[in-house]
Amino acid sequence: MKKNYLILINFLILILICNMLTGKTESSKVKSQSSSSIQPKGKAVEFTIPEWWYNGVFYQIFVRSFYDSDGDGKGDLQGIIEKLDYLKDLGITGIWLTPIFGSFSYHGYDITNYYVIDDDYGTMEDFEKLVDEAHKRKIKIILDLVINHTSKKHPWFIDSATNENSMYKDWYVWSDEQLPGWINASGARQPAWNSLLDVINNSTNYYRYNKFYYTAFNGTIPDLNYENPKVIEEVKNIAKFWLNKGVDGFRLDGARFIFEDGPGDKQADSPRTIKFWDEFSKYCRTIKPDAYIIAEIFGGLDKKVLYYTEPNGLSAVFNFEFVSAINSTLAVGKLTQFKLTIKNMIEAIKRIPKEFFSIFISNHDVGRFAELVRTMEKVKIAALLQLTLPGGAPYIYYGDEIGQREGDKRIGDAWKRNPMWWNSSQLAGFTKNQSTWCGQMKTDSQFFTNKINVEDENNDPNSVLNFYKKLIKIRKNFVSLQKGDFVEITIDTNSDKNLESVYAFIRNYENNIAIVVLNSGKNSVVIDQKIDVKIINDNINKLKYVDGIYSKDQNNPIPNEIINPIINEGKLKLNLDGRDYILIILEKS
């Protein structure tokens, strides 16, 4: 009996110790999560990637430059509403709006108020109408979410700098000294730590006078402090506010720099930053289950791969490497860097979904591709590659679809963001004003002299605009171009060194096959060889032609003398002039 009693006592003591240990562990976990986590509560659920994340085509609008509806020389939300039918006709299924929040600068990347529409662009009612009208046309809307930093004119920052008792005291990254070893993480020629001398109303009499604040970019946009859980809570509130307004997701600006784990390489791509965006994405989907979150991650593919965690994490990242490769290829006609980039992409998508990498050609930072190459043939080849290579939803920068060039380079970096060319009138139909927000536009003008504008190109069946329309339609109609496997076709260059400028590949998915062949060089070539790809060899005499586009005639079916050798013999027989290309869509019969 005594023995049994002692056993019972020991058992109770053991339970008590286990409870104490369990309680300690849970308390530690809660504390850890509260400092940097936004993981929603509840069990993990199965997540299926929505098709619109990869089968559509997005269009980036720099709002100030798209269309001015009220004659003040600045593009606005109502202007976008008035052009939605144009975007639908082009085949666009999603719009990325560059920052529309209250901001100090023309570009909007220094936010002063996250909960209002900038006065230059309209009202909240205008925005709600835009979302509603876009959705009626089955066009999604995503917003540029700039939450790595704010403007130094933001009330949060001013109060953090001037008020020792401020609730925002620790909302930014402060230091008593300029810490050694820290670099500008974004690569700009700016210090990482900026001194507060007389930046607040030209005064020296305030709390943090002569202290230092951290920035990944420049001194006008101080970084927020994500070590502070109140900052994370506010970021959640901002996302929730706009998702409840009906937006379909966000583009994340400066996404590499949320947490700094030390100087140098530790200032970017911290494991905590990657975890934060994963959890932020999941949080957004507790509000909107199919919220689409795409991040600006410049740097190598090795950096981008780190940001893929699982299907319910980040939706996509932008593929900056494609921009560099296509610029090199079509500016000088050399395929070496391009092939290496594609090879690296294919290696990357063996580990993570191909839909994670979204391809673009131009944007508000890298400038316009058409300005670099200055020929419409090269613009078309770039578009062909962008819309047929593996990746997530492609992004078209406003004006790329007409081959728009850049603006006046004397005006800061606004030349990358000049007003849209709608017609051949003096200010290209952008505004009824006598000038635009960036002054007079070039009057040498390509939109006038060479008819590079929407109105003239719409009436020209061989224009870049009509090429984009047809190409987008083909991409949307055939699943091989959305999520098909990729196989490069080896081109035999022994007979002619000019064939080194030829690039060819196949995308295939189930019964659908796409073949792309292009000549990036300026010399004519003759191709006469076996394709030697299993999907073709296994289906000789079982394939039929269903669609395509050809540089020699972009409006009619591909000639039989090109199609028949493929479907009957598995051979490519092509005469390609310089900058020629062809896209052939086949189906198994």
Image: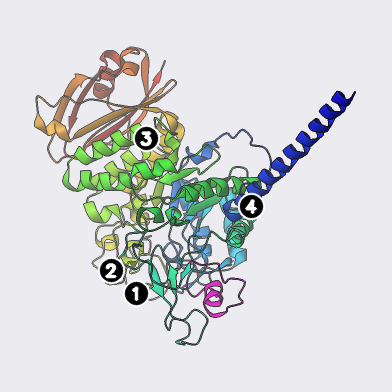
Q: Amino acid at mark 1?
A: Gly
Q: Amino acid at mark 4?
A: Lys
Q: CA distance from mark 4 to mark 1?
A: 54 Å
Q: Nearer the viewer, residue 555 or 361?
A: 361
State the mark number for residue 93: none
- Picture coordinates of residue 464, whole percent (x, y): 31, 47
State the mark number for residue 31: 4
In this picture, residue 378 sits left or right of residue 363: left
Q: CA distance from mark 1 to mark 3?
A: 44 Å
Q: CA distance from mark 3 to mark 2?
A: 39 Å
Q: Furthest-front residue in view? A: 2
Inspect the magenta stretch and tell me whether residue 167 lies in it: yes
Q: Amino acid at mark 2?
A: Asp
Inspect the magenta stretch and tell me whether residue 38 lies in it: no
Quick one: label 4 or label 2, which is nearer the N terminus? 4
Q: CA distance from mark 1 to mark 2?
A: 9 Å
In this picture, residue 5 sits left or right of residue 495: right
- Picture coordinates of residue 504, whole percent (x, y): 26, 30
Q: Are marks 1 and 2 in contact (CB under 8 Å)?
A: yes
Q: Which residues are magenta?
A: 152-173
Residue at 14% from the left image edge and 31% from the top image edge: 499
Q: Nearer the viewer, residue 430 or 16?
A: 16
Numbered disc 1: secondary structure: loop
Q: Is residue 552 visible?
A: no
Q: Are marks 1 and 3 in contact (CB under 8 Å)?
A: no
Q: Where is mark 3, residue-wise?
A: 348
Quick one: label 4 or label 3, which is nearer the N terminus? 4
Quick one: label 4 or label 1, which is nearer the N terminus? 4
Is residue 567 shown above or below 460? above
Quick one: label 3 or label 2, which is nearer the N terminus? 3
Q: Where is mark 1, residue-wise?
A: 439
State the mark number for residue 408: 2
